[in-house]
Image (spheres, grey):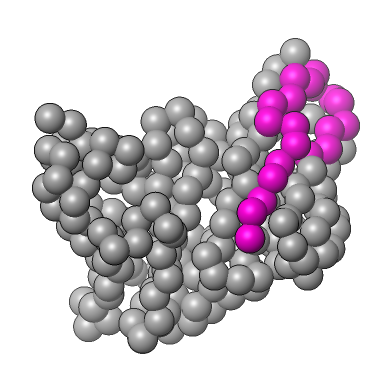
């Protein structure tokens, strides 16, 4: 079945870096765009970044632009989020989600992982 | 594109008909999805392209709208519907979410 599994979360000090991974299975990973969406404790969903199926196009939320980098390895069916210069307000559960198309398709995000928790604290 | 939901919270009883509104800061045609999220869980896609019900989603859920104003209606609230609901536009990158509407039991 279609599945996404995030990993790499943890507790990190402000200013440090962390890399999240999202392992995909059950579908042709290289055929779809992929998103990262986060949710701070007690807050709503915040879209973070999207990458096209071939990695050629990437978009970021203003709140992470210049600090976070989305990437993918289609040979490993894995999505990544490199997070640098982390701040306290980056503390959140980070979800990866499968796009319905090669990049931000008109249909919604039907497949989500369970999320990985990132806590930025000294 | 900014997405604004109203109300932010809604207190209702089992069996009630409820409607949540989502407004876009500019026209997004029909590129609007609705999600349901329960505590500790990932969001679940209910409706996309404004009115297309996802497979397995009960028919008491319906969506409508186009352009800048959209609605999610639950025709008869059930106990399992008490959750937070989000809209999201996919018309233009970045694909933004509304702030959410918390459905609470009256």
Q: Does residue A34 sit above or below A122 in this rendering?
A: below
Of A25 and B27, nearer the camera is: B27
> Percent x, y for residue B5?
71, 41
> Percent x, y for residue B106?
75, 13
> Percent x, y for residue B97?
58, 51
Q: Which residues are magenta?
A: B1-20
Quarter where residue A72 is shown: bottom left
> Percent x, y for residue A82?
21, 61
Q: Is residue B17 magenta?
A: yes
Q: Is residue B49 visible?
A: no
Quarter where residue B41 is shown: top left
Q: Does residue A32 sit above or below A35 in this rendering?
A: below
Q: Residue at x 75, y 36 (%)?
A: B6
Q: Does residue B70 sit above or below A14 in this rendering?
A: below
Q: Residue at x 80, y 59 (%)?
A: B68
A80 left or right of A63 in image = left
């Amino acid at each position: 079945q279609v599945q996404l599994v995030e990993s790499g979360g943890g507790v990190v000090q402000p200013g440090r870096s962390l890399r999240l991974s999202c392992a995909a299975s059950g579908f042709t990973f290289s055929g779809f765009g992929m998103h990262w969406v986060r949710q701070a404790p007690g807050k709503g969903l915040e879209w973070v970044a999207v990458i096209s199926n071939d990695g050629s196009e990437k978009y970021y939320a203003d709140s992470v632009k210049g600090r976070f980098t989305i990437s993918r390895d289609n040979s490993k069916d894995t999505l990544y989020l490199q997070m640098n210069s982390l701040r306290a307000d980056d503390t959140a559960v980070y979800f990866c989600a499968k796009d319905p198309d090669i990049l931000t398709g008109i249909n919604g995000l039907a497949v989500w992982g369970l999320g990985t928790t990132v806590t930025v604290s000294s | 594109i900014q997405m604004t939901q109203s109300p932010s919270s809604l207190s209702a009883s089992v069996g009630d008909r409820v409607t949540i509104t989502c407004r876009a800061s500019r026209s997004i045609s029909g590129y609007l999805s609705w999600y349901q999220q329960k505590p500790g869980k990932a969001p679940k896609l209910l409706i996309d392209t404004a009115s297309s019900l996802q497979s397995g989603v009960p028919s008491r859920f319906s969506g409508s709208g186009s352009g800048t104003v959209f609605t999610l209606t639950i025709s008869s609230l059930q106990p399992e519907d008490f959750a937070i609901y989000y809209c999201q536009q996919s018309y233009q990158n970045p694909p933004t979410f509304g702030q959410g509407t918390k459905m609470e039991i009256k």
